[in-house]
Image (tube, grey):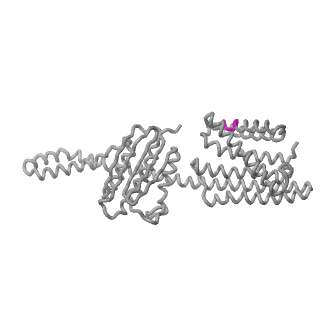
Amino acid sequence: MKNWMFILADIIGLLLIIIIMKMFFPMFGEKRRYNILIEIIADSLFVLIGTIINIYKINQIIFAIFFYLIICFYSWLYEIKPLKRIYSSLLSYIMIIVGEVLMGLLVSSITKMSVEESLMNIGHYILNAIVSKLFIYIIIKIISSYVVCKTNSIPKIAMIAFIILPATTFLMLYFTSEYTYKNNEQIVQIISFVLSLMLILSNIVVFFILDYVAKQKDVEKIIESKAQQLDYERQYYSDLYEKQVITDKVTHDIKNKFFAINVLFKQDPKEAEKELDNLFKIFNDVSMMKITGETGIDALLNNKFALANENNIKTDVECIIGEIKNIDTIDLCVILGNLLDNSIEACMKIENIEERFIKINIKQDLQTLQIKIINSNKLTKNIERTTKKDKAHHGFGIENIKEIICKYNGYYVVDKTESTYTTLVGVIDKYD
């Protein structure tokens, strides 16, 4: 039977595997809704069964099968399709085994010992059982942050720490294990083992702190996005209120105005036509153009078109969509609002007002809602995050758009020429 230090190293390695799986399996399916007690029981069973398998490792093939089965068992905490469950479990198993094998070969090549001999040293065993999992954790963390596009993103400073910490830990544990290997006293081995575990635990704590900081940054982005959403809602209700006041006023005076125009037609037809044109203009200002059929989105678009009109920007909109079922209206408002703000800002830089234009095309292609915006553009050499004066509170628009697009498994494409800037955004109107 294994020495207790080796068994404890295996248990810590299994706990790290659980952390890895909690990041890995969400790439393939949503986490099931269950009581926290069930998760604790599942974690405990995984560690218990994994420890028993490691202690009584009779045959490598049997060990591999049993270990793959307990990973499959753990994947049931997530709603994953059967085929995805099989290959995601297999992929996680392969990553763990490959990580251990590569670490064993690295230690063996440095120490000039066989893999079997090096694993008899508790220091080398810790490198193989635990540090290899830390490197896998880093890889999964990077993939889940940048490829899967979940909410948490890793800052660059944290990325450096993610790489340096395990590498430093590897070197320190290696030299510690070499000293322990040359000194056969049990007390030295125990002290070395405890110090090694403390070093590894400090790595894990730092990783969790960095992860917490990254999540806090994401919370700040979410707060900024929510504040922007509230601004759009406030503007919408403000517009509705103003239009209602004007409508009430026009309705109140409409009889008198038509009576006066009727009299003017008999006395001065040209003046009567002017008054009639003014009346039509008032009705056009009051009435909100129906574009998408969604009141909130239409209010936003009308507000942006009015702003474009004030700045002598020609607007052209084409919208061919049906019912939007699974996309949040506020999310669409954030996307359209930010894109149109950027388009208006770009057009206002063009001195010749005749060249200012914005073309909007919104259409549905099967389950994808596609938004295409083309605006006139003055190509500049220096591209900044934002050209607005208040740079502390602006420049997050594109980031907010990309986060929403990721939420709906969509896409974001930009095409620039000397005179135009085209943005193509697609979001999936189906989120099973």
Query: Which one is nearer the viewer's eye here, 302 or 20?
Result: 20
Residue 73 falls inside the magenta stretch? yes
| Residue found at the far top of this picture | 82
Residue 26 falls inside the magenta stretch? no
Is 152 positioned to the left or the right of 178 in the image? left
Q: Residue at x 34, y 48 (%)?
A: 317
Is 1 positioned to the left or the right of 40 in the image? right
| Residue found at the far right of this picture | 185
Count of labels shown?
Answer: 0
Query: Which one is nearer the viewer's eye here, 326 or 287?
Result: 326
Q: Position of residue 361 (x, y in %)?
A: 38, 47
Query: Which one is nearer the viewer's eye here, 415 or 183?
Result: 415
Is 326 positioned to the left or the right of 156 in the image? left
Q: Which of the 4 image quarters holds residue 162?
A: bottom right
Q: Residue at x 76, y 54 (%)?
A: 200
Q: Position of residue 248 (x, y in %)?
A: 26, 46
Q: Quadrant of the N terminus?
A: top right
Characterize the magenta stretch by its predominant secondary structure. Answer: helix
Query: Which one is nearer the viewer's eye here, 342 or 249?
Result: 342
Which segment did they paint magenta?
A: 72-76
Q: Position of residue 187 (x, y in %)?
A: 90, 55
| Residue found at the far left of this picture | 267
Q: Residue at x 65, y 46 (%)?
A: 23
Q: Position of residue 250 (x, y in %)?
A: 23, 47
Q: Residue at x 38, y 42 (%)?
A: 294
